[in-house]
Amino acid sequence: MGASGLIEIKRRIKSIQSTKKITKAMGFVATSKLKKVRNRLTNNDEYVKIIEEIVQETVNSLPDDYESLYISNREGKKLYLVISSDVGLCGGFNNNLIAYFNDVIEDRDNSKIVLVGKKGKAYFDKFKLKADKYIVDIESIPTTTEVNELKYIIDELYTSGEVTEVNIVFTFFKSPIKQIPKMVKLLPIEKKYDGQDKYIIEPNMDTVFKNAMNLYIESKLMECLLQSRVSEESSRKIAMDGATDNATEMLRVLNIKFNRIRQSIITQEISEIVGGAEAQK
């Protein structure tokens, strides 16, 4: 391989250097976003736990003959709210999530699916899944706007009886290097007979229970959106850091190859000069 080979290697080195700059910058951005949304998740965790405890104790305190859609098990369609990402370049985040959902969905013909995120659609097509509604352009740090939009959809379908169970499928952030697809049942809530004293609900049981359920649904939606976003940014950081490391290794190998070829060319040129000089003696 001669001078033309050197030109090709230099072209590849330049291309990889440009790619490395991009992946390194994206890794920094992902790190920054991860820190912000993870702080938001941490601050939200304690609030969610308190709301869950209050709602569960409220449900446990309801009279045995109390009737509500939120605590009754009914036959009917199930709603699955699947939270994917709007942006790509996050490793196996979306593929793992949709593959998991494809395994856990029990009856496709008797289900309704709401897909959150643009990138999930391609994986839905891959697994021959079809969503009934798409929600896109979620903020980098989820807000009450997105929560209210999703809650409105759930309320409309659940209170009308169009669906009788609501499940959220999302990616749970276990650690910076491990994110796990997960499904949680949002509605209905099961009564738990744990032997604890029951609350006295005043002044109006229906009003207190309805307000508690609204807080519960909103808090769980926010929790799942935040868990998903933290997992997404963590996956993206891992993917970009890996791409940057791969680019560094490729540059190392190409530079060694470049120097060897250049050394070979120089050696050949010196040999030709020496050979020419010898021939003139």
Image (cartoon, rainbow, N blue to C red):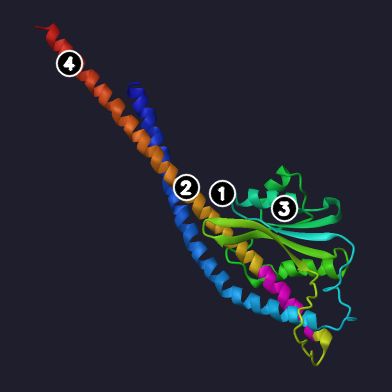
Q: Secondary structure at mark 4?
A: helix
Query: Which residue is identified by label 3?
Result: 101
Q: Is residue 221 magenta?
A: yes
Whole-angstrom CA distance, mark 3 to mark 4, is 70 Å
Residue 91: numbered disc: 1
User: What residue is rendered at 85% in x and 63% in y?
Assistant: 163
Residue 265: numbered disc: none
Q: Nearer the viewer, mark 4 or mark 2?
A: 2
- Where residue 122 appears, as percent x and y from the top left, is 68, 46
Q: Which residues are magenta?
A: 208-222
Residue type for callout 2: Gly
Q: Residues within 10 Å of mark 3 (few under 14, many from 20)?
A: many
Q: Residues within 10 Å of mark 4 (few under 14, many from 20)?
A: few
Residue type for callout 1: Gly
Say if mark 3 contacts mark 4, CB within 8 Å.
no
Looking at the rendering, in which quadrant would you find the C terminus? Answer: top left
Q: Secondary structure at mark 2?
A: helix
Whole-angstrom CA distance, mark 2 to mark 1, is 10 Å
Q: Nearer the viewer, mark 3 or mark 4?
A: 3
**Which image quadrant for residue 264?**
top left
**Which mark is first along the chain, 4 or 3?**
3
User: What residue is rendered at 69% in x and 70% in y?
Assistant: 220
- Where residue 45 appears, as percent x and y from the top left, is 60, 73
Whole-angstrom CA distance, mark 1 to mark 3, is 17 Å
Query: Which residue is identified by label 2?
Result: 242
Whole-angstrom CA distance, mark 4 to mark 2, is 47 Å
User: What residue is rendered at 56% in x and 51% in y?
Assistant: 90
Query: Which residue is identified by label 4?
Result: 273
Q: Say if 35 sits above or below 216 in the image.
A: above
